[in-house]
Amino acid sequence: MEALPLLLQTGAKEVAVVGAGAIGMTTAITAQRLGLKVTIYTKDRFPDVRSARATGTWSPHSRVAMDSAVTDAFVTKWERMTRRTYAVHQSYLGLAGNPVEWVDRYAMSDTPFEKRPKTVIAMPGGSSDTFVDFEERVKDLTPRNEDLAASSHPFRMPFVRRTSTLRYNVADLYHQLESDFLLAGGRFVPIELNSAADFARIREKAIVNCTGYGARALMKDESVIPVRGQIAWLLPQAEVDYGLQYNHVSVLARRDGILVQALGADEAFGFNDPNEEPDYAAARDSIGVVATMFQPRTPATSAAAG
Ligand SMILES: Cc1cc2nc3c(=O)[nH]c(=O)nc-3n(C[C@H](O)[C@H](O)[C@H](O)COP(=O)(O)OP(=O)(O)OC[C@H]3O[C@@H](n4cnc5c(N)ncnc54)[C@H](O)[C@@H]3O)c2cc1C
């Protein structure tokens, strides 16, 4: 929606999108809805795109940018984009396959919930910075942010907070997006661009670049920095239909699997780490933490929980 006014200004009726991740697919479909003929040029398609590896939580404020890079214009634009994506994703609720749905998440703690202090991040090049924190700006969009009394939950931890949030069942969402794109006459063309000059190989002259992390190498844009770590997958279980968070580990049950994610002790975890190798020891550790989430209450923990 942000790119489309620029595309329309060109007057082109046939446009190209490069990349078929979450951003490429949604950009292409949005352009089609305005009557443009869209071709997606891409190296990979689902399930090989990085978007297929996301946890699947609606978390627009998570690690968006560094404080030093933010201007008032960026904040305004971020909030506009966030509210639009929220509204658009409401239209995917209730569809067959449940590409998007609401889910309850339970955060658990042994100590009272307090806002974590900002972590100072060592930036490439030697400076330091902190992540922006926009969570409060869109708090009104996620209902049910409530602390639970011990009598209303089964966990042994004394502090439990429930929120409701949008969950993406990523396999279904992709199926939906690709089907919508193809039904509206869209076409995929396999291509790998090796430098900015390679955009000239594309027939259409109005092009939206949606290469995600790939833009770092393609455009030599070192401001694109990887920020997340390891995710382990467990088999889906129909009866597990919620999210959990405790002790730096997050769990999100989706219809296509249960995702267990190591969050790290602070925001520096996984920052600027391009390693994509699975780390089985880290996965096992995280699953070990999940086991502790379900330890039964003892007289001592019951007393602590009040
Ligand atoms: C572990 C993890 C968990 C995450 N969890 C969440 C979450 O819960 N919620 C959330 O909102 N976000 C999450 N994210 C972030 C989210 O996954 C990304 O922000 C998002 O998927 C980026 O989408 P994209 O379309 O920009 O990029 P990508 O999915 O990377 O797509 C890029 C596309 O461009 C193509 N491409 C790239 N380079 C070239 C080239 N040179 N030539 C041709 N084609 C090219 C690729 O083939 C691909 O089709 C998570 C990320 C990670 C790593």
Image (cartoon, rainbow, N blue to C red):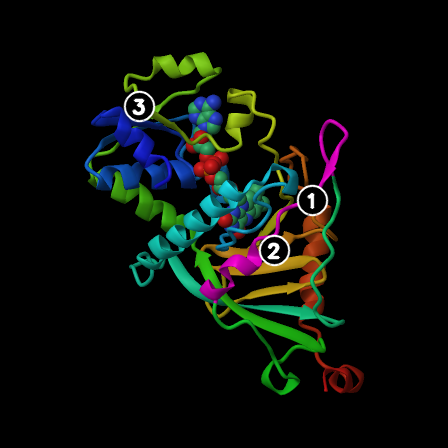
Residue farthest front in this picture: 72
Task: Describe the element under mark 1 as helix, strand or loop.
Answer: loop
Left/right of residue 160 with respect to residue 97 in the rendered view: right
Task: Describe the element under mark 3 as helix, strand or loop.
Answer: loop
Q: Which sits earlier in the primary sequence, circle 1 or circle 2?
A: 1
Circle 2 packing at 10 Å, graded few (<14), some (14-19), many (20+), is many
Q: Say if 160 sits above or below 200 in the image.
A: below
* Residue at x 38%, y 36% (from the top left corner): 24
* Residue at x 59%, y 84% (from the top left corner): 152
Q: Which sits earlier in the primary sequence, circle 2 or circle 3?
A: 3
Residue 206 disc label: 3
* Residue at x 26%, y 31% (from the top left corner): 8
Task: Describe the element under mark 2 as helix, strand or loop.
Answer: strand
Left/right of residue 268 with respect to residue 216 in the rendered view: right
Residue 130 disc label: 1
Viewer-side residue, 184 vs 196: 196
Disc 3 to disc 1, how far (Cα)? Answer: 36 Å
